[in-house]
Image (spheres, rainbow, N blue to C red):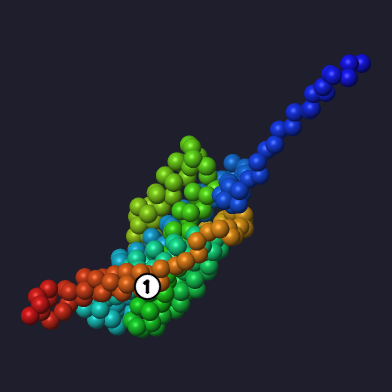
Amino acid sequence: MDTNEQKQAPHVEITPSPTVSEVINKPSEKTRAQSIILVLGTTLGQLSTVAGSAIQIQLPTIGRDLNIPESKLQWPITAYSITAGCMLLLCGRLADIYGRRKAFMLGAAWYIIWSLASGFAQNEIQLAIFRAFQGIGGAAIIPSAVGILAQEFPPGRARSIAFATFACGAPVGGSIGMLVGGTVTQLTAIRWRAMFFILCGMTCLAALAVFYVVPKDVRNPNRDKRVDWVGAALITVSLVLLLFVLAQGEVASNGWKTG
């Protein structure tokens, strides 16, 4: 045997280990049924938050039942809009930091609690306060649902279908909310209160779907966990003042005049 002959070393292919970000953001493998349940669950979450607008068609009945003067009759709607709009950005940021699944579940639980409370409200102040707290739940559900869909569906046809279905939740929720709200007000014994209990059921189904299909959140130690609390406070206060003026401008003594 030739001593100068060199043995060829075996070729070893080294595969780099996935980064923390790749592990966390990798979509979990799902069956078609699980994907459908996920899309329908998140869409139902949006649909239930938007369907709360059904209270608009119920305002005359609510005003008679709770003795709310016409000048204050818009507050059950305005209170929800203020908190839902003002807390949307902050809730979205917190969902990115602490987990979208957790944010969705907590937002759904919060929404259910205050929907039930709204159904049992006995006067205008209670209803306005309960609706304001209910809006915080809606602000947590929407951005976390968007994040869940983006995380669980890789770019492609499936993601496009998922987001298109989710986007339908807003117009469909508004239409169904008006229809169901008017129907239950006319045909049920508890009238307008029934709509809040229906919203509880819809949100429960959405939460169960997300709990069943979406895996637990994985913490990313490299994620920036800073929250701009000053900016969040400024934009919240600004939006509250703006929406308050828009809501009360018509009933002020001088209307929209400044003097």
The residue shown at (35%, 78%) is: 128
**Residue at the extreme front of the image, as rendered:** 4
Tell me residue 78's x, y (percent).
30, 71
63 lies left or right of 219: left
What amino acid is labelled 1 in the image? Answer: Val
Tell me residue 28's x, y (percent).
61, 47
The residue shown at (28%, 81%) is: 68
81 lies left or right of 158: left
Residue 116 against residue 95 in the figure, above or below: below
Location of the N terminus by quadrant is top right
Q: Nearer the viewer, residue 100 or 56?
A: 100
Residue 207: quadrant of the picture? bottom right
Location of the C terminus by quadrant is bottom left
Residue 207 visible within the image: no
Q: Nearer the viewer, residue 6 or 197?
A: 6
Residue 237 visible within the image: yes
Tell me residue 24's x, y (percent).
59, 52
252 lies left or right of 190: left
Q: Residues within 10 Å of mark 1 (few under 14, many from 20)?
A: few
Residue 27 against residue 221 in the figure, above or below: above
Local SS, label 1: helix
Residue under circle 1? 230
Residue 138: quadrant of the picture? bottom left
Q: Nearer the viewer, residue 193 or 14?
A: 14
